[in-house]
Image (tube, rainbow, N blue to C red):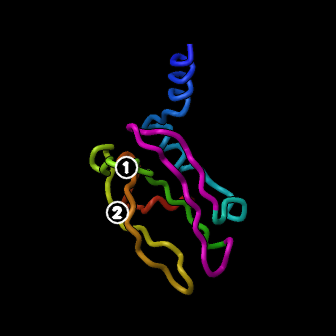
Amino acid sequence: MIAILLSLALQADMLGDEALRQYAASPFDQAEKMHKREVIGVHHGATVIAEYPCADFCPNYTIRVIRYELAPGMSCASVGGVVTSIRIPDGFGASGRSYCVPKVLDWQRGFVGD
């Protein structure tokens, strides 16, 4: 019985490609999300999180970064991710940070939400 409940709970958090694309394309409130971190669900066996960093003129410069949070022993390639550099607001400018991001998303855009 416990195994069935655990299986159902895990399935509820599973993200398909389309659900992940829709989440990434959805608007967000910069003031509400500023400096927060949220677990979105599980995609290809890895936890997907959204982070909302901001610097300088907050909340206007709050961006959304959607990325995998890899468990020990997992590689970005093993979950179908792509390692990319995303410009993150930092002081009076921005710095590039490398993240493992879902390949299904338009990673060339850097996962900055609208």
The residue indicated by pointer 1 is 72
Rounded to the nearest angstrom, the CA distance separating label 1 from label 2 is 20 Å
Q: Position of residue 108 (x, y in %)?
A: 36, 61
Label at residue 99 = none
Asked which secondary structure carries label 2, the reply is strand
In depth, the one of 94 and 18 nearer the eye is: 94
Position of 55 compared to 98: left or right? right
Answer above or below: position of 17 versus 10: below
The residue drawn where x is 38% and y is 38% is 44
**Is residue 46 in the magenta section?**
yes
Say if 94 sits above or below 77 in the image.
below
The residue lying at 28 percent from left, 44 percent from top is: 78
Instruction: Tell me, yes or no, whether the highlighted magenta stretch contains residue 49.
Output: yes
> What is the magenta range?
36-59
Which quadrant of the rendered structure holds the C terminus? Answer: bottom right
Q: Residue at x 56, y 47 (%)?
A: 39
Most foreground residue, 53 or 74: 74
Residue type (three-letter) at the residue carrying disc 2: Thr
Q: 103 or 53, which lies in front? A: 53
Task: Where is residue 80? Give x, y as percent.
Answer: 31, 44
Say if 93 sits above or below 32 in the image: below
Amino acid at dot 1: Pro
Percent position of residue 46, x then y: 42, 42
Q: Secondary structure at mark 1?
A: loop
- Which residue is the extreme one toward the bottom? 92
Name the residue carrying label 2: 84
